[in-house]
Image: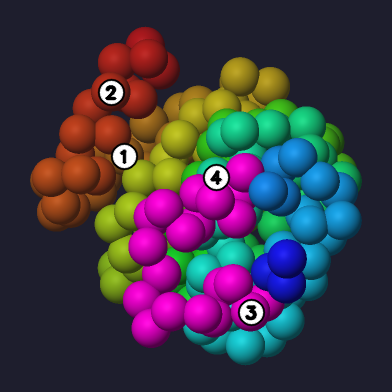
Amino acid sequence: MNIREELLKYQVQSKAQAMQIATDAAGSEMVLGELIDCFTSGDTRLTQRAAWSLSWVAQKNPEAIQPYIDIIVSQISRPEAHDAVIRNSLRILEDIEIPEQFHGEVLNACFDFIQKKHTAVAIKAFSLHVIFNLSKLYPEIRNELKLVIQENIEFETAAFRSRGKKLLAKLK
């Protein structure tokens, strides 16, 4: 199977297609390597589609993603990264154990996403959860997270408010 061809085969990527690619990648290091190559290709459409499949791989087989955490973290820090790539990268980071060497970079990126007015709501929601997960290791950021949620909650969308309220309850 040529992952690049599969990702670009259709005009619109379906969930079934993304999940099939993820299933293949979760079960094969070679296929996962191809998917990672597509994820870092620089081709906007290919990278977006690979990101979606990669997020499913992380749900199916989180251990398979671990060797590629550096690549995933680098994607959230790229200023030109498409929202879909950032969103799916954060979805991955939300559900896995992030190695300590990336904690600072991930925290900075997530706090930046939350505080930027025009950041997509899903990116903000995933960022909140990633920060919350890391706050278990760094209790000193819990107050900052609470403050950011409280300052933004009334001006944000329903999705942000919902995630924010749930996290505030857990932060008490």
Q: CA distance from mark 3 to mark 2?
A: 41 Å
Coloured how? rainbow
Say whether residue 31 is magenta: no
Quarter of the figure with the N terminus: bottom right
From what the image shows, is residue 22 above or below residue 35?
above
The span from disc 1 to disc 2 (Cα, nearest Å) is 11 Å
Front position among marks 1 and 4: 4
Is 34 or 41 nearer to us in this picture? 34
**Looking at the rendered structure, which numbered label has been put on residue 5?**
3
Query: Relative to 171, is 2 above or below?
Result: below
Q: Position of residue 78 (x, y in %)?
A: 64, 75
Residue type marked 2: Lys
SS of the residue under disc 4: helix
Q: Secondary structure at mark 3?
A: helix
Up/down of 70 relative to 118, above or below: above
Residue 54 place in picture, x, y as percent: 62, 53
Q: Are marks 1 and 4 in contact (CB under 8 Å)?
A: no
Q: Quadrant of residue 148?
A: top left
- The residue tagged 4 is 56
What residue sits right under mark 1 in the picture? 149
First along the sequence among labels 1 and 2: 1
